[in-house]
Image (cartoon, helix red, strand yellow):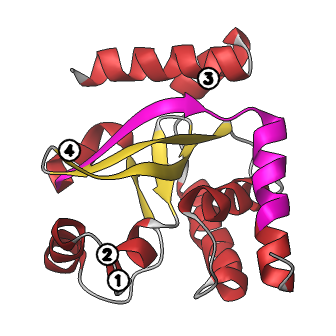
Amino acid sequence: MTTDLALARLGRLVAASHSWETARTFKAYVPSEDDKAVMAARAQDVLKVMAGKDVTAPMLNAAYAVHLARALQAPIVVAEGVLSVAGTPVAEDHGWVMIGPWLADMALFSRAYAPDAPPRLAAHVLRAFGPNKGLFCEAWRRTPRLGLGYEPRRVLAEADVTALVGEATEVLRGVA
């Protein structure tokens, strides 16, 4: 699938879970350097609280999206779908944040560095990025050049994101 077709499909998913206006704003967004600095700073904030905790990729990225939305005037959605390496699926249940057509994945590195990581993912991430990384952030159209594929199956509605953040909070409190 070409980048334009993939972005159009993602726009339809955003419209279905949010609105067509959100989808138009989403596709047109271009982050400034200040926006990118905010993305990195908010990722560090989330990692300080959630690193090493037993949260899923969608939970971690939902928490990041909520934290990011408080600091950034940008179209932010959480997507769920398939993460692949060099065209081979390595996680069918992955979640990530889309900030317009930019992808931010708080869970990529923690998933790849975990002892039970899919071998293909672990090897690729270590080779391509090295150890001790926390946030993967890139223009979505450039991720295939880095050997990664993000195929969204759905874009979460606000209620879904709130529920995931609630689940993550329970894990952090030791309730779950």
Left or right of 147? Residue 134 is right
Where, quadrant-wise, is the C terminus in this rendering?
bottom right
Neighbours of disc 2 within 10 Å: few (<14), some (14-19), many (20+): some
Q: Would residue 84 be found to the left or right of residue 168 on screen?
A: left
Report whether residue 17 is seen.
yes
Of the two numbered discs 4 and 3 on the same chain, state the one appearing first in sequence: 3
Q: Secondary structure at mark 4?
A: helix
Which comes before the other along the chain, label 1 or label 3?
3
Q: CA distance from mark 1 to mark 4?
A: 20 Å
Which residue is tagged 4? 144
Give amino acid for label 3.
Answer: Val
Q: Nearer the viewer, mark 1 or mark 3?
A: 1
Q: Is residue 151 magenta?
A: yes
- Residue type indicated by callout 1: Tyr
Distance between the alpha carbons at the discs numbered 2 and 1: 7 Å
Q: What distance separates the C-alpha of mark 2 from that of mark 3?
A: 30 Å
Disc 2 target residue: 117
| Element at label 1 | helix
Which comes before the other along the chain, label 2 or label 4? 2
Residue 113, numbered circle: 1
Identify the residue position indicated by label 3 in the image: 14
